[in-house]
Amino acid sequence: MPIPNGVKPQAWHLLAIFVATIAGFVLQPLSIGAVSIIACTMLVVLGVLTPSEALAGFSNGTIWLIVSAFMFAEGFIKTGLGKRIAYVLLSRFGGSTLNVAYVLSVADFIVAPFTPSNTARGGGIIYPIVRSICSAIGSEPDSEKNKRTGAFLIFSSYCAVITSACIFLTGASNNVLVVTLSKEMFGVDVSWLAWFAACIVPGLILSVATPWVLYKLINPELKETPETKVMAKKELEEMGSMSLAEKMLCGIFLCALVLWATSSIHGIDSAFVALLGLSAMLITKIIDWADVLNQKGAWDVLVWMGVLVNMAAFLSKLGLMTWFAGTVGQQMEGTSWLFMLVVLAIVYTYVHYGLASNSAHIMALFGAFATILVAAGAPVLGVLILFGALANSCSLLTHYGCGVTPIFFGSNYMPQGQWWRIGFIITTLHLFVWLCIGLPWMKVLGLF
């Protein structure tokens, strides 16, 4: 294609490789890690970037934050602390079906800051618990007995995993991708505390509203579930008292949380707070080096995120995003940035019907949409966090929305048509809350 006026040949060639990489992410002829390695190699072979430029993304501290947080997830699963938290809450508050949904949401909320993989948190901690609860109350996918109750608990738990991903920067790996792109493309640092402060109010509203809405939509047969309390108490008895490893992990967990929240005081980078936590887990032998090596998801994220973030950064440095924003801005001249924000947020959310990866969604659309809005005068930090949160919310649309979705959908409590219908309703609820409550709240914080 001819190079547009105002665009450097190097930027245009980089865009070609970038678009091909995103296409590979969406179509997945190979794993995304393999696609990324090929893309990184071609950047140098085709003379688009130098070797040091092509590999620069692997020195990004924020990416190492997410790698370290994956190791926290391994600690929660290996020690059983994640399950213990959930069972303690269920043994005390799990007397009704709606209460069970709220308890599982609270359990996920507690664990989410240290489990950036939705698949690890949802599939490794929350799903096994909710599936056991379904069996305890006599709800099985191959039987009509209490099937709506099982469907409610499964879908509500899935929604809790996605909502927690919105609230915490370290609640999903794609959030860190947003933060890294924000730094590389706009020169804006999004701290853990800033993300949390911006998302906690709309996130808590969604955490409270979603189970209630699902309760009305699905109408579970069972309203009271005393079996859940009995099952949770039995599981706790089998687990016994807290192990030394669990107690130490609690201490490390709380220390890391405090250090992240007070980074502006002590000045330690968030990535190195996470690495400090990982070091503590290794020293105390909560996990060992073999566990670190076995965290394939963490190293996979390091590879593809290091390559993609670096390409996006160079697209910005070479002026392509500025050119794109100016071109689109000319077409929308005279339109307020707030109107543009609402329209683009709607498009950004529902376009996920055509995507099966939150990270691919962000790489394809986040930079372009954010650039347009910033060029139109929208506040940078508010736009970045809002579109970061919406990249999680859109996962609810389909049964392939993100990596953890097939685990919950695969329980077979809900047919695909019903999953899509309810997913559309809950996604629309998310969009409404983020735009109508999230934006005013961010304005109170000074982000808008």
Image (cartoon, helix red, strand yellow):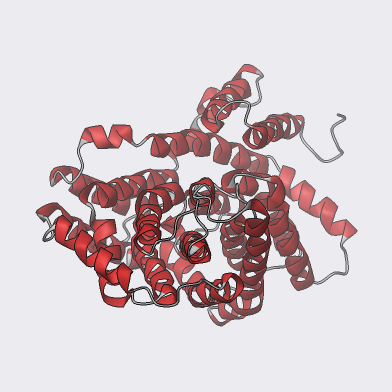
Res 252 → quadrant: bottom left
- Nearest the eye: 75 or 331: 75
- Nearest the eye: 168 or 384: 168
Picture coordinates of residue 329, whole percent (x, y): 83, 58
Res 41 → quadrant: top right
Question: Taking the image as drawn, is residue 368 in sight?
Answer: no
Picture coordinates of residue 36, whole percent (x, y): 56, 29
Residue for point 47% across, 33% down: 303
**Horizontal placement of 61 versus 79: left or right?**
right
Residue for point 61% across, 79% down: 437
Residue for point 62% across, 60% down: 387
Question: Taking the image as drawn, is residue 235 in sight?
Answer: yes
Residue for point 57% across, 58% down: 388
Query: Quick check: 389 above or below 356?
Result: below
Query: Quick check: 203 above or below 300?
Result: below
**Can you say which quadrant of the picture contains the C terminus?**
bottom right
- Nearest the eye: 256 or 396: 396
**Can you say which quadrant of the picture contains the N terminus?**
top right
**Horizontal placement of 47 versus 265: left or right?**
right
- Nearest the eye: 74 or 217: 217
Picture coordinates of residue 446, whole percent (x, y): 56, 77
